[in-house]
Amino acid sequence: MALKLAMGTKLVAATHNPGKVPEIAALLDGRFEIVTAGQLGLPEPEETESTFVGNALLKARHAADLSGLPALADDSGLSVTALDGAPGIFSARWAGPTKDFAMAMKKVEERLEETASDDRSAWFTSALAVAWPNGPAVVVEGRVDGTLVFPGRGTRGFGYDPIFVPEGHALTFGEMEPAAKDAMSHRARAFAKLKAALFD
Ligand code: ITT
């Protein structure tokens, strides 16, 4: 069987992050019937892998096997050059149990001040995995490079968006129109690869 997702397929968006859902829906462009892991009442798996790819596969596999439907998961995060790639796969965990991203962004700022470095370069990564129930899985990765600014600016997007200015632009992801972010983000770049691999 060729691994393809036909238009209209019912697909689980295997995320519990409400910030990701509209981005995933916009990037999928109405091709599929999307149900979220939250809508299906699926439990959130523990992210035990040490890479974005590993955690994306784990989340997609978990949702597909539990729901009996193909599932798409995103594992993503912000990596800061001067912090040796931190927070990386721990990006969500730096915000703590209450998902306080003002605190997480402050932590990035403080950690940067502790290093004597004036390097403010950073990048976002998104690993996207599609898994079929008790079947195969496909995973791709996208990345966008940029610079961090403090204090953060803008109220759009989610997570670390207010402190990230993508290369070649002046606005942060938190200030941009959603469509502008979706045209260049790590998630959009990963989606382009996924489309080439899996869509009719
Ligand atoms: P799910 O696992 O349920 O999808 P999560 O928030 O736990 O939700 P991740 O483990 O992939 O997801 O954590 C990624 C974190 O990285 C996320 O919570 C954001 O803080 C950050 N992040 C990822 N993509 C981002 C983006 O486009 N803009 C801002 N922050 C982003």
Image: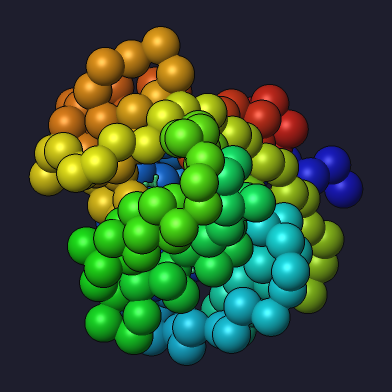
Q: Which coloring applies here?
A: rainbow
Q: Quadrant of residue 75?
A: bottom right
Q: Relative to 53, say whether 193 is above or below.
A: above
Outermost front residue: 116
Q: Is residue 16 left or right of residue 177?
A: right
**Res. 122 visible in picture:** yes
User: Which residue is farthest left?
Assistant: 155
Identify the residue at horizontal 35%, vertical 72% (top origin).
95
Q: Is residue 147 left or right of residue 115?
A: left
What residue is rendered at 71% in x and 42% in y?
140
What percent of the width, then of the height, locates residue 160?
Answer: 33, 50
Q: In which of the image's four quarters is ligand 1 placed? A: bottom left
Q: Does 151 sit left or right of 194 as displayed?
A: left
User: Which residue of the protein is positioned furthest toward the right in this rendering?
Assistant: 1
Q: Nearer the viewer, residue 22 or 166?
A: 166
Q: Provide residue 165's location: percent of width, then percent of height.
A: 34, 28
Snapshot quadrant of residue 53: bottom right
Q: Is residue 91 left or right of residue 26?
A: right
Residue situated in front as seen by the camera: 144 or 25: 144
* Quarter that holds the C terminus: top right
In this rendering, the answer to whether 90 lies above or below 176 is below
The residue at the point 59 percent across, 42 percent down is 81
Count of labels in the image: 0
Residue 82: image location, x then y, percent: 57, 45
Q: Position of residue 42 (x, y in %)?
A: 46, 84
Observer able to see residue 35: no
